[in-house]
Amino acid sequence: MRGLTSFVWAASLLWCTWLVAGEEPTVESLSAAVGGPDQAAAVVAIDALDKLGPHAKAAVPALVQALGHADEAVRWHAARTLSAIGLDAQDAVPGLIKALDDSAAKVQAYAAFALGSIGKRPSRPWRN
């Protein structure tokens, strides 16, 4: 339960920060949160980028760095989001290939899925 509480707290804090600033989160601000020190905030930001699909292509460098994060959840969320970006995540291929040797099976599985998603049209409908 501690992990869920931390996740909810980070999500609330991250969104409230943007609300107080009077801004909606952007791909750039979400990318910055991915590389931040808070693991739970990184996962929240990665999940928000996942919802953007191909529109989050500017986040690919941050997501590639997240593939090497110490926390397993950050790594598999990053791999999953790269699969949602699809064709525009081609720069992530070397990092995803490396993630196939990750110690966590979930990271390996999402990395394989992401590699399969890069190079073909996305199967999910995305908002324009």
Image (cartoon, rainbow, N blue to C red):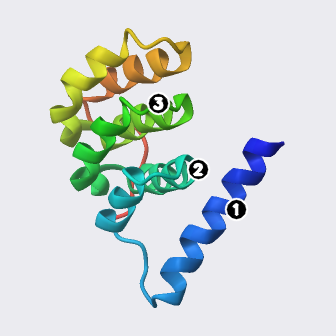
Label 2 close to label 3 by CB (< 8 Å): no
| Residue 77 visible, this angle | yes
For disc 3, the marked residue is 70
What is the spatial separation of the Cα atoms under label 3 and label 1, in whole angstroms?
20 Å
Amino acid carrying label 2: it is Ala
Residue, far front: 37
Q: Is 100 situated left or right of 18 in this image?
A: left
Number of marks drawn:
3
- Residue under the image location 47 percent in, 56 percent down: 45
- Residue 36 place in picture, x, y as percent: 41, 54
Which is more N-terminal, label 3 or label 2? Answer: 2
- Residue 13 place in picture, x, y as percent: 61, 70
At label 2, counting other C-alpha atoms closer than 10 Å, the crowd grade (few under 14, some 14-19, many 20 or more) is: many
Amino acid carrying label 3: it is Ala
Amino acid carrying label 1: it is Trp
Which is more N-terminal, label 1 or label 2? Answer: 1
For disc 2, the marked residue is 40
